[in-house]
Image (spheres, rainbow, N blue to C red):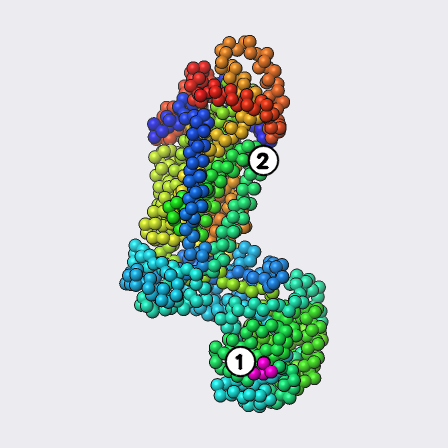
Amino acid sequence: MSWPPPRPPGAGRPEREYEKVAAPKKGRSASAQSKPWRSLALILIAIAALTGGMFWSGNTTPRLGIDLAGGTSITLRAVPEDGQDDAINPTNMNTAVDIMNRRVNGLGVSEAEVQTQGDRNIIVNIPKGTNSKEAREQVGTTAKLYFRPVIATEVSGPGTASPSPSASGSGSPSPSASATGKGGDKDKATSSSTAPSATATSQGRAVTDALKADPTPSGSASASPKASASPSASASAPAGTADAKVQAQYATLNCADEKARSTAGKGAKPTDTTVACGQNSSGLWQKYILGPAEVDGTDVKKAQAVFNTQNASGWTVTMEFTGKGSKKFADITGKLAQQQSPQNQFAIVLDGEVVSDPYVNQALTGGSAEISGNFDQKEAQSLANMLSYGALPLTFKEDSVTTVTAALGGDQLHAGLIAGAIGLALVVIYLLLYYRGLSFIAVASLLVSAALTYVIMSLLGPAIGFALNLPAVCGAIVAIGITADSFIVYFERIRDEIREGRTLRPAVERAWPRARRTILVSDFVSFLAAAVLFIVTVGKVQGFAFTLGLTTLLDVVVVFLFTKPLMTIMARRKFFADGHPWSGLDPKRLGAKPPLRSTRRRPAPPAGPVDPKEA
Amino acid sequence: MSKLGNLGARLHRGEVGYDFVGNRKIWYGISILITITAILGLAVRGLNMGIEFQGGAVFTTPKHTAASVSQAESYAEDASGHDAIVQKLGDGTLRIQVAGIDTDKADQIKEKLAGDLKVDAEKINAELVGPSWGEQIANKAWQGLAIFMILVVVYLAIAFEWRMALAALVALIHDITITTGIYALVGFEVTPGTVIGLLTILGYSLYDTVVVFDSLKEQTKDITKQTRWTYSDVANRSINSTLVRSINTTVVALLPVAGLLFIGGGVLGAGMLNDISLSLFVGLAAGAYSSIFIATPLVADLKEREPAMKALRKRVLAKRAQAAAEEELPAGGRTADEAEDATPAVVGPRNQPASRGRGRGRPSGKRR
């Protein structure tokens, strides 16, 4: 392989031998002369079809990235919980993307896009004109979900500094799932780094379970907190279950105060009894004493908002538990069902905040449960999201947040376009000066290449979510050089052949196989670089690598299907074939040797002073 | 053009040319000198890592902000409690960098700044970077670099031969060292844009080298069947005959980058365009240099150690020394057979140490 056969000559062979070898080539090239039009037609049809597709799909411009269009781009990095490094896997990342997507777009931020990037990053792009701050809070929220039994609860306000947990009768709010759309507290986004209570099922298994079958018909058992049920009970047991410290915390806790709220129960381990706050359906803050977490967010396999048509309970949230989770859930609900209110309630605690506190009236053993209440669709979906998000043993950290105003984005786009135009113009001028008539072919090829790049980028916007950002523009501009170089390689080969004394048509055909190999090899290296960068790197580097790879591929297509056939056709024109001084192929100007004088193809190299004498 | 065309023709025919391979030691020396300087620069001065690699925030105010640089600096320091670096760009935009702040706090700082500077907070561009983000980008870049190098060496070893792969790798490392060294010495800020530019050099530097190698491979295909030229001679001719193309390629590659640099530096002041094009510009120049002056002579050096090539060199020199070739024929024929045997095993055995001294010592003595 290292010495491939096709081309004959060695150094210092007599010219006669060349002509012998050249003869069959000429014949072959003659038969190949019918092909150029076909290739040209092929690529022109392809361009026409792609352009047609572009107009048909209505995406006549490439989708612009945040840095060109303006908006906010947030890069989040997944951090696995201790000892669960395998939690970063495509399944989990996709779930997280899904949930974030619903959360962000649920805010009315339409067109926000959430994508994974690399193996552990999620990029959230929020276009200008939307409330990026709110979206950022939503996205940045770390979800740590626990199911804890309620030991005591009461409405908490500035005035109610009631010391004992037994005093609870005041203002009976409905305890039922009070999950409003609140996404949690922004300040807690990174705070909850509490150790997980082990036992978390791996997501992988959860999936296989899900694939097997729906374990039991869901809804067979249901926790149905009615909105009317009020926590009228005066707690009788809590004194025994909650220790004095927590009691004291509870007594002084004022959930109406935002600061107190955010520190309530901070740093509590899942196995501790703790205090927490939550907002009930009437908008009042309520404080809780909660027992140790009995069920973990990771025990939830799936949660869904369902519109229950059977018993007209409206929007409900169904949960499915994993194998271990359903056993734990059955245990806790069995225990809770025997208690009196409020101790028959369990609290769904997200990031230290109670998002729902349904009560239980029977043990729920089916591995699935339903939370009902006076949800509207949004509330139900929000709760379901939080429940499924909690199943991920991942937290997300903000790695970078870029806010670009529309004005700057426009400026950058403008600058990029000008830079591209200048670059292209400079290249064209250089080619024109150096290659004269030949540069017509080069410029036409560059234009075809540019058109293809533009159309494909426009089409890739909706197809794979490709967005043209500033690095991608840079990549495209840099690619002008690579594309133009392919022509240079070919033209130089042709000129070399002419210098050997050949006329244009055989020169064009003979130069092609050599130039082709060079172009393929060097484009392959370039493509390899782009592909490796695209796969391995993150963020801006990726956008750049993508454009570079795309343009390198297009370069090969254009050279094969456009430049070469065009060259073949042009070689038949008198202007080029006769070596007009302005054609760039004038044998005299190129210093072609008159055939008679040439005895050697390759004359003496200038290597040493000895050589010329000998040659 | 006609002059250039003529030059091309004469280069092609070998009437003019520069003895790249013969003078390789000079260029090796220069490269080693530059590389050492670059490494020293890296060690002593270190790289000026941008905010993306330290964690912090960059705020960019709208055009024609009234506040002066020192005002903005004190505002920013008040708001953040950290040191701030403020630059005023050409169009009156202020670029305020604050290192070491959390992404969480940046929003408050931005609002406070907006109040102090009397601009709408919505009109301030902000780039907030966590401390590990830049590190992550850099790590990924290194990882990509390593994977790419391995793949490309394997590919070149298959498509060409291991000596060329090795030489290309050396040239590549040479380019990257020089580029980072220049960054360290001049003190340009290193940003993700710089990393992108640097990574692009990978492709470009090799692209150029590969074209020269391709020509070299083609011309040396039947090298053992003749006795006129040594491998170094042919290598030199390959460089010279692709010189026009190398120059053209470099010019054509540099022109758009120059356009980017002009627009990035002149119009936008600073930013991604500028960063990418700056490192590209430096890297491309280094790449063009290394593929001509380093990579190919290195291949020739390595190749000359091969027994077949040493035999060839001996034959060529013998032939040159004694114009009367007739007496040499028997000897020539014998070594030719040996050479033929050795040819398929290009990646084969290294030469024996005993013959190395002789094989290398003689020709270079002769040639100088």
Distance (Cα) linking label 2 and label 1: 68 Å
Residue drawn 51% across and 26% down? Answer: B219
Image quarter where the N terminus of chain A lies is top right
Residue found 54% across the figure and 45% down from its top: B146
Chain for disc number 2: B
Whether A600 is among the magenta residues is: no
Q: Quadrant of residue A162?
A: bottom right
Which region of the structure is painted magenta?
A: A244-248
For label 2, count other residues whose C-alpha is less than 10 Å away and answer few (under 14), some (14-19) or many (20+): few
Q: Secondary structure at mark 1?
A: strand
A50 left or right of B73 in image: right
Q: Do dots 2 and 1 share one subunit? A: no
**Magenta-colored stretch includes residue A247:** yes
On the picture, is A273 further left or further right than A134?
Answer: right
Provide the residue designation for mark 1: A279
What mark, if any, has residue B178 been given in the picture?
none
Q: Position of residue A535 (x, y in %)?
A: 54, 50
Q: Amino acid at mark 2?
A: Ile
Is A465 or B258 nearer to us in this picture?
B258
Q: Is residue A204 left or right of residue A476?
A: right
Q: Is residue A153 above or below residue A327?
A: below
A262 or B89, which is in the foreground?
A262
Residue A24, by quadrant, is: top right
Mark carried by residue B158: 2
Residue A384 image-quadrant placement: bottom right
For the point 31% across and 57% down, the residue is B88
* Chain of the residue where label 1 is placed in the rendered structure: A
Residue B339 drawn at (x, y percent)? 60, 21
User: Is any part of residue A249 visible from this angle?
Assistant: yes
Give the secondary structure at mark 2: helix
